[in-house]
Amino acid sequence: MPSALPTDDRPVTGCASGLYIVATPIGNLEDITLRAIRILGGVDLIAAEDTRHTTKLLSHYDIHTPLISCHEHNEQQRTAELIEKIRSGASVALVSDAGTPSVSDPGYRLVCAAVEAGLDIFPVPGVSAAITALCASGLPTDRFVFVGFAPRKKGRRLELLQSLAADDRTLVFYESPRRIMAFLIELQSVMGDRPAVLAREMTKLHEEFIRGPFSRIMEVLRPRPEVKGECTILVAGAPPSRPIDTDALGDLLRERLARPDARISSISKELAGLHQLPRKRVYELALRIQKEIRNESEES
């Protein structure tokens, strides 16, 4: 078992040259490690996603280390500057607004550049919204897929969801509160009304976990004028596929194809994956049913 005590010659106060990836609280300011506080107070410079946000954390712990911004809009430019500083002997801590940098947050480019430059990189672990939500979700935790934010473009987003529809592992997504209802509708449409958990405002005063199928989560959110706080959505893995006869498959296709935004190729791919059927067979049946729906519409 590895020792919990330092075994290298890094100073206890002050920090050796290198890049420190420091996890910070996702809400409650007490959720930070003693080591993270020491590192943030000992490095030469802190690269922060939002300096205004990080200033509040530093003030709370009476830390006065200089700050520089490093976010998605300037990361490419900042990376070159920060790599040069570290090469010159500086110690730099990278922090995001909440949680662990470079995990669905800025920092990936900087870490890659540091690796390529052969610089020392020191992870300083702590809170992650994905793991925090997962451990309290009540969904299986032994096997899971961290997806993060789905693509902004609808076509690419639906393609991603369809590729995950048959996965039997717990799925973990991040989503903005402004888009959460639309995303839940898409999840239900592609994956069926399966068990899920919506976690928001975690570790804060108004922390909330909404558990149940997608329909129940949407029922809880719908009356609210707005949803606040970044959302973590956990989705139960696909149940074991069961044989499905042509009549039952036809009923499923008819229900999906009757929707205004129905796309035969997407629906066929989704159902073929869920029931482990040849996609061509499902697609041909979908074409036939779509033709029947059109004929019925014309007759009425």
Image (cartoon, rainbow, N blue to C red):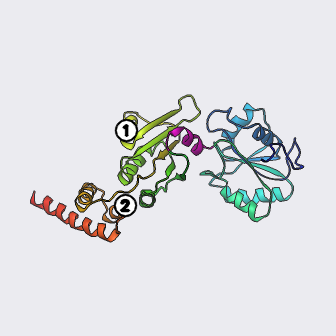
Residue lying at 83% horizontally and 47% vertically, measured from the top left: 44
Where does the image place residue 240, in percent across and percent down from the top left? 40, 54
Horizontal side of residue 114 vs 107, given as left or right: right
Against 228, residue 279 (above or below) is: below
Where's the C terminus, which quadrant? Answer: bottom left
Give SS at disc 1.
Answer: helix
Where does the image place residue 42, in percent across and percent down from the top left? 83, 42
Q: Earlier in the sequence, mark 2 or mark 1?
A: 1
Query: What residue sits right under mark 2 in the picture?
Result: 270
Where does the image place residue 156, in percent across and percent down from the top left? 45, 61
Note whether residue 256 is visible.
yes
As for residue 136 lying within the magenta part, the answer is yes
Which amino acid, by three-letter code, is at mark 1? Arg
Give SS at disc 2.
Answer: helix
Q: Residues within 10 Å of mark 1 (few under 14, many from 20)?
A: some
Q: Nearer the viewer, residue 186 or 255?
A: 255
Residue lying at 12% horizontally and 61% vertically, measured from the top left: 298
Q: Which residues are magenta?
A: 128-139
Q: Which SS does the magenta portion mostly show?
A: helix
In space, the residues marked 2 and 1 are separated at their CA atoms by 23 Å
Against 29, residue 295 (above or below) is: below
Rendering quarter of residue 153: bottom left
Find out whether the residues at labels 2 and 1 contact each other: C-beta distance under 8 Å. no
Horizontal side of residue 198 vs 216, given as left or right: right
Query: What residue sits right under mark 1 in the picture?
Result: 216
Residue lying at 39% horizontally and 52% vertically, measured from the top left: 191
Where does the image place residue 177, in percent across and percent down from the top left? 48, 42
Horizontal side of residue 252 vs 114, given as left or right: left
Against 23, residue 238 (above or below) is: below
Which amino acid, by three-letter code, is at mark 2? Glu
Rendering quarter of residue 59: top right
